Image: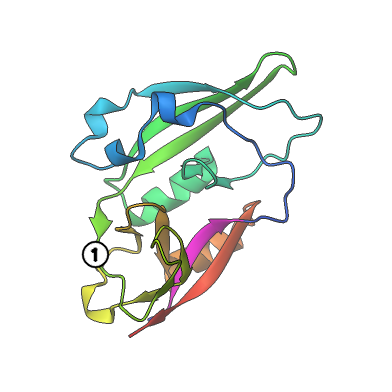
Amino acid sequence: MEYFRLRQDKDYLNAPIILDVIKQIQRRYVTPEDADKIAEITVFKLANHDKLDSLDLLDRQLFLLSRLLKDTVKLYVPKLVCKKVLLLNSAKKVQLLYYLPIFPGVDCISDQSIMTPDKSVVKKLVLKRAEIPKQAVFKVRHSHETIIIARLDAAESMMRRRFRGIKMHRVELE
């Protein structure tokens, strides 16, 4: 089976940038055990942009999905818990609704993965085949990055729907 890492396409230079993320949602609470510490709806201010690209996936500050992408992921993970995130820029009269998926983390990073010296960024991701769950979309446990993986069937489903702003990188397995 093949697996792909879901990432925001960095070619879109005008992606939404959220202000003051840490003040409202701490990354350590984005787990099923601590999901109740995150409000059902969180409102964030957007940085001022003259032009804003509407993307289906954001991963710079938080891993966020558009409604359509969330619905597609839920086809493969029906019990996925998501919290609403509203991005606002009142000066530009812009309002964007996204969803914060709360996946359990799976400890499946191989020692063959290449990371920065402080282990905060995974440069080359290699997964342990034996530790990969049967779930079609899952989160790899990592303390600094949100790493979401899609099995081939789920990745193909997303590609067929032509979502905007998603890059998929094939993941090596050991």
> Mark 1: which secondary structure?
loop
Magenta residues, as a range? 2-8
Q: Residue at x 40, y 61 (%)?
A: 118
Position of 91 with respect to 110 (left or right) is right
Q: Residue at x 28, y 80 (%)?
A: 129
Q: Residue at x 27, y 69 (%)?
A: 108
Rendered view: 31 above or below 5: above
The stretch drawn in magenta includes residue 38: no
- Specify the farthest residue to the top: 90
| Spot occupied by residue 162 in the image (x, y as percentages of width and height) | 64, 57
- Specify the farthest residue to the left: 33
Position of 50 with respect to 61 (left or right) is right
Position of 143 with respect to 49 (left or right) is left
* In the foreground, 29 or 153: 29
Rendered view: 33 above or below 90: below
**For the residue marked with disc 1, what is the amino acid?**
Asp
Q: Residue at x 31, y 76 (%)?
A: 110
User: Which residue position holds label 1?
Assistant: 107
| Spot occupied by residue 93 in the image (x, y as percentages of width and height) | 71, 16
- The image quadrant of residue 136 is bottom left
- The image quadrant of residue 39 is top left
- Specify the farthest residue to the bottom: 174
| Spot occupied by residue 60 in the image (x, y as percentages of width and height) | 55, 45
Callout count: 1
- The image quadrant of residue 28 is top left
Rendered view: 26 above or below 42: below
